[in-house]
Each structure stands twice: as structure tokens, then as C-alpha cells.
Image (tube, rainbow, N blue to C red):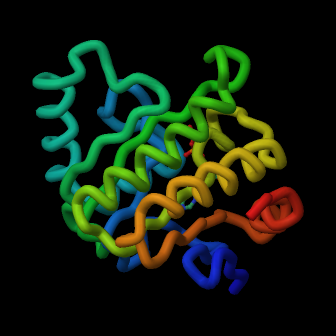
Amino acid sequence: MHTFLNGRVEVRTGDITSLRVDAVVNAANSTLLGGSGVDGAIHRRGGKQILEACRELRETCYPRGLPPGEAVLTTGGNLPARYVIHTVGPVWGRDQHPEALLASCYKKSIMLAANHSLGSVAFPAISTGAYGYPKDEAAAVASCAIAQALAQADAIERVSLVFFSEADRDVFLAHQQF
Ligand code: ADP
């Protein structure tokens, strides 16, 4: 296990849906209605309560979809995690200012967790799958954004960064800027 920022950040491999943390972050898409990758895995394992909560948010707050860089919170349904924070990463090559949007995903997710007095949050590598963000560049952006957000979120004790493969984890470790 690799840790940074005096143990407040841990870097690990595995399936994010199996973590018993206060909140897991979902690399969602704007529809909030599910998709592939992490999104599919969270909805499959978390069950229909999560989808119901997403539908309601969509109808009441985001009829045109959740914009990239924003984050919302729902129940964790049947997941071991208590809550899911859904955030929409930038699509590489489509969205302008991808760096600012990716940083915003991490910062707003951490702020949302802090506002709900949650102590532990687990992130997947947002945008680095179907959305095509280069993994080395994403590592630098994510680590800077997390460090900045944690400096203003004392209640957050532990941020876990969860990579699907050891290769992805190693790219992160080589390019992080904690
Ligand atoms: P995006 O659409 O934001 O790119 P994806 O879900 O396609 O999101 O991929 C984001 C990252 O999450 C990828 O690096 C992918 O390998 C990884 N990933 C996919 N499923 C899981 C999972 N169950 N747990 C942890 N990481 C996952």
C-alpha cells in the first residue's frame, strides 16, 4: 500500500464496488442513468435504489443532465459503501478545459463528502477509461486537486485511490504530484 499526505491518501488496486467506505465516487455520465466501466459496476452491485435516486435528481435538479466537473450524492444502495458520489469527468478531445473539469470532479466530490461529514472516500481514476483522458496527465491533475481539497476539508480522514490494474496504479505512482 502506498500512502501520501501523512496517510490521508492511499493508493491501491482492486474493485471499487467492494470497498467499505463512507462514499465511493462513481465515474458517471451526464445522464446519471448508468453506463459502462465503474458506472455499470456500481449500479449492478448497488441495485435499483441508486438508479431511483439518480432518476429523481435528474428530474428535479438536472433535466439537461449533470454537467462535467459537477458532483452529486445518493444512497449506496446494496454496496458496502454508505453513499455514492456521482461525478462526470471530461471527455478527452470533446470537452474544453479538460484539466479544470477533471480537477473540479475531485474537488467537488471531496467538498460534498465533507459537507455530509463523511470521513472516508474512494475514487476510481475518473475519465481514464471510456472518456480517454491520458493516464499520466490525469495522475498529475488528480493528485494536485486532491491535495488542494484536503487542505480545506479537515473532516476527511482517508481518500483511497483505487486502480483496476497494477499497471494503472504504477502509471499513477510515477506521475502523481503529492
Ligand atoms: P470514464 O468514463 O470516466 O473514463 P470508466 O469507468 O470507463 O470511466 O473508467 C475509469 C477508470 O476506472 C478506468 O481506468 C477503468 O480501468 C477503471 N475501472 C473500471 N471498473 C472499475 C472498478 N470496478 N473498480 C475500479 N476501477 C475500475
| Location of residue 32 with respect to 170 vertically, above or below | above
Tag count in the figure?
0
Residue 103 left/right relative to 84: right
Q: Quadrant of residue 171?
A: bottom right
Kindly give the residue lying farthest to the right in the view shown. 174
Q: Residue at x 47, y 66 (%)?
A: 122
Residue 52 left/right relative to 17: left
| Location of residue 71 with respect to 171 vertically, above or below | above
| Location of residue 122 with respect to 19 vertically, above or below | above
Query: Is residue 167 visible in this depiction of the protein?
Result: yes
Residue 22 left/right relative to 17: left
Quadrant in which the C terminus appears: bottom right
The residue closer to the viewer here, 7 or 94, is: 7
Q: Residue at x 51, y 70 (%)?
A: 159
Position in image of residue 10 (x %, y %): 61, 77
Position in image of residue 78 (x %, y %): 22, 67
Position in image of residue 28 (x %, y %): 43, 39
Quadrant in which the N terminus appears: bottom right
Query: Is residue 43 visible in this depiction of the protein?
Result: no
Q: Residue at x 19, y 61 (%)?
A: 77
Position in image of residue 95 (x %, y %): 62, 17
The residue closer to the viewer here, 124 or 39, is: 124
Q: Quadrant of residue 134?
A: top right
Q: Quadrant of residue 8?
A: bottom right
